[in-house]
Image (tube, grey):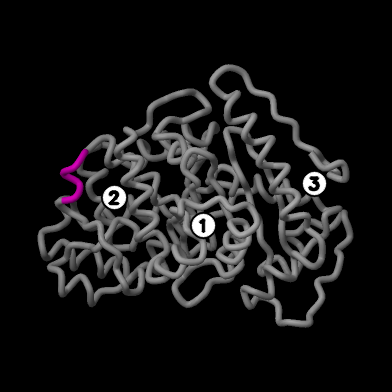
Amino acid sequence: MTTDDPDPITTTAPGHMSKWAATAGSAWVRFSRCFNLGTHHRLQVLQRSGAVPAGVQVQRKPAHKPPAADPSYRRSLLLVVVLGLALLCALGSWARSNWHAAVAVAHTDLQRLAAINAVPLALALRDIGESLWEHVGREPSGNKFNSLIQLEHEHGVPRNPFINAGALAVADQLTAHSANARGKLLRFMSDLCGRAVQFDYAVAKSEAQTGHRNAALAHFMKSFGVLDGQVDDVLDAYFHQCAIAMSAAELAKAALFLANRGINPANAEVIVSPLQTRRINALMLTCGLYDAVGEFAYQVGLPAKSGVGGGIVAVVPGKLTIAVFSPELEASGNSCVGVEALKLFVERTGLSVF
């Protein structure tokens, strides 16, 4: 542990958590050295992403000012590493003296984290099994995440479960196999997060009022017989799935079973089988960042799932999960600064599947 940390994190954990806690301590030392939040490193990430032009200096903010009130927050980054216990590090346009405020943001609910879509997929595979793949494929799309053109060419079957049409197919199957799919997903997510998460009903209502492209995708799929349920029911489940209010720390914690052979290290519960875990990670690696997935695999080399809300969750199998959040998006719908931070994380730590 570096001695200049204003808020050093100690890791103590009983029983089955001890391995994760020990790994957390080691990773935190490496992580804090790589991301010491000096001005140079903050600028390096922000400038490489295009969020801050070259030559611009990021000014130190008063320690008492919350990052959320900072006008530059839109171009800031929250990076959370979870290894059984949460290790929190804020990397963005506020100084290291703002550590406590950054931790507060880490535990603030962030709506529309579509990066959680790997979790409903796990639930569907656990409860439905391989028959899920009769309704959705496993190939990269190569097109925009909400493309209608590809669906027409492929008779209404989405390329993979992580584009919008594929997430609708997963929501359809969850709805078809449960009398209360929304409640079941919420309980599943709450169990993974370790607290009761809730829907943001205002966000879900907004999605329903403005999600015309998603409604078109669902009706198109229904016309080909790909959806089993009623379109309105499927859309309702999908819009609420996209409106689960979670913090970045909870997002990383919810995906932690994907780094641990399908087992939740917090309570040793088997979420999915090791084979299903490997296959979900494979899909995240090949399909998780929409039509930018190839470049991300080349630059970062980690299974990951992004969302247009600005969140990305990445997995280092056998070691950790990482959740990043920054709302500035690039053309493919992925977080600009989040992608750059993950690049830098892999460069400095060497943690990659390749």
In the picture shown, does residue 243 fall above or below 185? below
Main secondary-structure element of the magenta-colored stretch:
helix
Q: Nearer the viewer, mark 3 or mark 1?
A: 1
Q: Which residue is mark 2?
A: 171
Q: Position of residue 71 (x, y in %)?
A: 75, 70
Q: Position of residue 76 (x, y in %)?
A: 69, 65
Crowd around label 2: few <14 · some 14–19 · many ≥20 (10 Å): many
Q: Secondary structure at mark 2?
A: helix
Q: Nearer the viewer, mark 2 or mark 1?
A: 1
Whole-number angstrom distance, CA of label 3 to CA of label 1? 23 Å
Q: Secondary structure at mark 3?
A: helix
Question: Disc 1 residue type?
Answer: Ile
* Foreground pick, 115 / 351: 351
Question: Disc 2 residue type?
Answer: Ala
Q: Position of residue 279 (x, y in %)?
A: 31, 46
Q: Earlier in the sequence, mark 2 or mark 1?
A: 2
Crowd around label 3: few <14 · some 14–19 · many ≥20 (10 Å): some
Name which residue lies at 81% across and 71% down. 58
> On the image, which quarter does residue 343 sit in?
bottom right
In the picture shown, does residue 45 fall above or below 63? below
Q: Which residue is mark 3?
A: 100
Name which residue lies at 69% across and 35% down. 25
Q: What numbered label is drawn on residue 312?
A: 1
* Region of the chain picked out in magenta, as a range: 129-133
Whole-number angstrom distance, CA of label 2 to CA of label 3? 38 Å
Q: Position of residue 73 (x, y in %)?
A: 71, 65
* Foreground pick, 284 / 246: 284
Question: Disc 3 residue type?
Answer: His
